[in-house]
Amino acid sequence: MALGEGVKSLKIGDRVAAENHKGCGECSMCRRGRYNLCEVARTRDPAYKLYGHSAPGAFAEYAARPATILHKLPDPVSFEESAIVNQGALGLHAVRRCRIELADKVAVIGPGLVGLITIQLAKAMGATDVIVVGRGPRLEMARELGADEVIDYTAVDVVEQIQKLTGGDGVDCAFECAGTSLAVQTAIRCVKRGGRVALAGLTGNKPVELTTDRLVLDEIDVFGVRSSPNAYPELITLVGAGKVNVKKLVSRVYPLEQIEEAFDVFRRREGGAIRVVIKP
């Protein structure tokens, strides 16, 4: 284990969380701090690194990472919790993009890992009413993590129910965390006039049928959310302060010797597994 020449921000023995990508540092997006939109990301230029994809990941005894994408973990944050920081930071980026304000009413559509963290982040940023849309056991998990209301989309008309819960207004902001056409449509339909929508899910390039007149006439802001630029330090602080509970989202922890079982459990979502951690 070693530090590169000139690294002053870290020392041997520090516990860190690593971002999963690094921008080239030279393009216009990187210079603006939006390195998640690095202009060479879709090329083979080695200046951009997506670890585990276009660059070696962490399936090794040692891994080399630039100090600029390593973030110290405070004592209260375990390695198991830090394994969820990447998705949590995406949720924080979404909350920032949507400009959550004090007393906002919020809908989170899709109580997966990102959605369950977004519930807590919205609350931490001042939202007073958080409505979660999903189905199955994760709705109960959403309640445990701070959701004020939950809606089973298989049982009721979601938009109609949100209207009832908000006095006919709709929510100020909707977070789409499911990656389906229906979720995108629901997010846009459930916000009030002048509302904001953050799209954090991917539909796999499947087309989404939309009537754009409402976006225009009601001035609905729609934001795409990609990765987690500049979000790690704040999220780690929130986790360390106990304002965001990620420990509850670690479903199981496996030793390295049981890596195949760990992947199998995660693929099958056995027991409603949300996040499975492999600990060497």
Image (cartoon, rainbow, N blue to C red):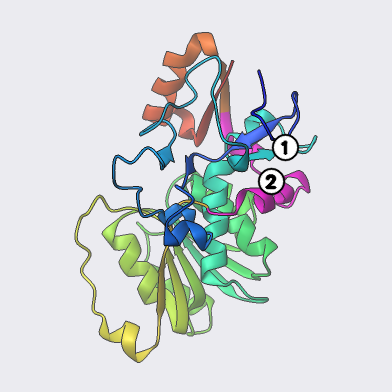
Q: Is residue 63 left or right of residue 70?
A: left
Question: In the image, is residue 125 above or below residue 141?
Answer: below
**Residues in magenta?**
229-251
From this viewpoint, is residue 157 visible?
no
| Residue type pointed to by label 1 | Leu
Q: Residue at 34% of width from left, 61% of height from top? A: 183
Task: Decide which of 29, 225 is in the foreground and name it.
Answer: 29
**Residue lying furthest top in this view?**
257
Residue linked to disc 2: 236
Q: Is residue 231 left or right of residue 213?
A: right
Look at the image and say whether residue 43 sits in the magenta stretch: no
User: Which image quarter: residue 209?
Assistant: bottom left
Residue linked to disc 1: 73
Q: Which of disc 2 and disc 1 is earlier in sequence?
A: 1
Q: Residue at 46% of width from left, 47% of height from top? A: 23
Label 2 packing within 10 angstroms: few (<14), some (14-19), many (20+):
many
| Residue type pointed to by label 2 | Ile
Quadrant of the drawing holding the C terminus: top right
Q: Which mark, residue 232?
A: none
